[in-house]
Amino acid sequence: MRRALGIPKTTDILQHIESLPPPRQATASEAVRSIERQAMASQAPQPGLAALMAYLDDRAVPKAICTRNFDVPVRHLLDTFLPASPFDPVVTRAFKPPKPDPAGILHIARRWGLPGAAGLIMVGDSIDDMAAGRRAGAATVLLVNGVNGGLAAHEYTDLVIERLDDLVAILEDGFEGRDASQRRDGAGGKDGHLADEPTSAAL
């Protein structure tokens, strides 16, 4: 995408588009959407996706999506691989400001009637995902792959998994983010590695 827009790797794509004059914004936005549409043809579910969704759905755990993509490829992914698994809300890049700003995750929390994101888990594979989750106050889980391993030790990453269904055993034992552990320990908690099962998941 950056090559199509003629920008370096250090430049945020969405911020760059927002900085352009209106006629160029429209052209650049369509160039990005065209690439995303082409990528739809090769979409494949992450390993462990079906098992994790079945676990969450069996327990009526609400799920949402917070993404920097536009709605067409997101809807294609859901309709193709998760037609029976509800996600609400689905926050795309039409929502401003996008990740890494925490606004999208906080919007999800409000839609679910929660006072904040402390009970949410943000699962993702990018620094934008980890940053948005941490800034919102959610627990963060990095789905590690061949290109993002450097984020495993990042201060914004609470937990690292290799497959989505690795989360099942973790949720059974109880998991919370670093911020929540520090808040509880500061209030007199003594078992920093133990926690109640999170009630919500934002992906």
Image (cartoon, grey):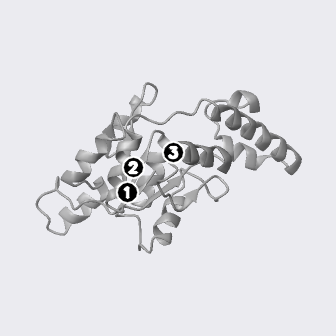
The answer to whether residue 155 is seen in the rendering is no
- Amino acid at pointer 3: Asp
The answer to whether residue 135 is seen in the rendering is yes
Q: Position of residue 36 (x, y in %)?
A: 68, 37
Question: Can you say whether 155 is above or below 134 in the image?
Answer: above
Residue depth check, mark 2 versus mark 3: number of the one nearer the observer: 2
Q: Work out which quarter of the rendered image holds the N terminus and state it.
A: top right
Mark 1 neighbour class, 10 Å CA radius: few under 14, some 14 to 19, many 20 or more: some
Question: What number of labels is visible?
Answer: 3
Question: Can you say whether 114 is above or below 71 in the image?
Answer: below
Secondary structure state at the residue bearing disc 2 = helix
Residue extending farthest to the left is 190
| Closest to the observer, 36 or 137 | 36
In the rendered image, which residue does mark 1 sit on? Answer: 57
Labelled pair 2, 1 in contact (Cβ < 8 Å): yes
Q: Earlier in the sequence, mark 2 or mark 3?
A: 2
Question: Can you say whether 39 is above or below 30 in the image?
Answer: above
Q: CA distance from mark 3 to mark 1?
A: 26 Å
Mark 3 neighbour class, 10 Å CA radius: few under 14, some 14 to 19, many 20 or more: some
Secondary structure state at the residue bearing disc 1 = helix
| Closest to the observer, 16 or 160 | 160
In the rendered image, which residue does mark 2 sit on? Answer: 53
Q: Which mark is residue 128?
A: 3
| Closest to the observer, 191 or 155 | 191
Residue depth check, mark 3 versus mark 1: number of the one nearer the observer: 1
- Amino acid at pointer 2: Met
- Amino acid at pointer 1: Asp
